[in-house]
Image (cartoon, grey):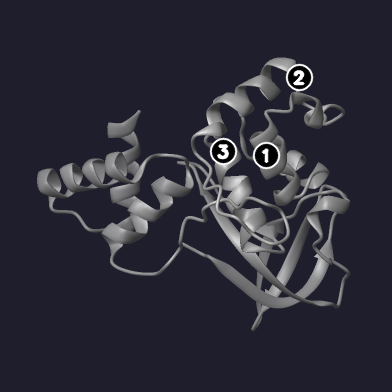
Amino acid sequence: MIGRITGTITHRDADGSVVVDVQGVGYEVFLPIGTAGRVESEVGQAASLHIHTHVREDALTLFGFATAEDRAAFRALLKVNSIGPKLALAIMGAMSAGELHDAIARQDKNAFKGISGVGKKTAERMLVDLRDKLDFAATGQTGVRLRAVPSQPGSPTDTVVGALINMGYKRGEAEAAVGGVINASGDENVEGLLRAALSVLS
């Protein structure tokens, strides 16, 4: 999975997406819209983005963030029931990772007021679902910090397990699903493994 992209921004759209040229290959990356995202995205500017690769059966979408903490916050939001990538990105555009940390720590649902798509029930669900899923290690700036999920290249098995973790599955269930698929078919093709594992998990 793609974990980081460094290149030059050659195109920018109003929906928050940019095209980053990396040695002649243009990657479309969706960025948070709003001041909290802190991603400089002017055309012609060099950019180095922390990437979350979102994989579905019919699409592979890249989401970019200025810091590993922002990406970790985005991934944590994806684990909340009913929050998909678009809503998670909107939340990250409205508040920084540090502000999200503090809101969860305080159990402050009012912190999410005014964010499009986040109603009272969604805010309450975030507070409950994320309360025990955050690593509240002390930092000098925000008081708390989210645990980032590493994205490192490896074997096809590691790649698929990493993709499933990025999609919100727990490591244990991801490894069990991939292991069962390999034992059943012996196939180590990344696309085939991912499809089969998603079928098992669904």
Camera-side residue: 92 or 147? 147
Residue 73 higher or lower than 116, as above or below? below
Q: Find out whether the residues at labels 3 and 1 contact each other: C-beta distance under 8 Å.
A: yes
Q: CA distance from mark 2 to mark 3?
A: 16 Å
Residue position for label 2:
119
As drawn, is 183 to the left or to the right of 22? left
Residue 153 higher or lower than 111, as above or below? below
As drawn, is 117 to the left or to the right of 79? right
Q: Secondary structure at mark 1?
A: helix
Rendering coords of residue 46 (x, y %): 78, 79
Rendering coords of residue 23 (x, y %): 64, 83
For residue 175, the mark is none
As drawn, is 199 to the left or to the right of 88? left
Residue visible at 49% across and 38% down in the picture: 133
Rendering coords of residue 153 (x, y %): 39, 69
Residue 50 higher or lower than 46, as above or below? above
Circle 3 Cα neighbour tier, 10 Å, few/some/many (<14 / 14–19 / ≥20): many
Camera-side residue: 31 or 96? 96
Residue sitting farthest toward the top: 121
Residue position for label 3:
78
Total numbered circles: 3
Asked whether residue 86 appears in the rendered view, the answer is: yes
Q: Secondary structure at mark 2?
A: loop
Residue visible at 79% across and 44% down in the picture: 95
Question: Tag 3 or tag 2, which sits nearer the N-term?
Answer: 3
Residue visible at 47% across and 48% down in the picture: 166
Q: CA distance from mark 3 to mark 1?
A: 7 Å
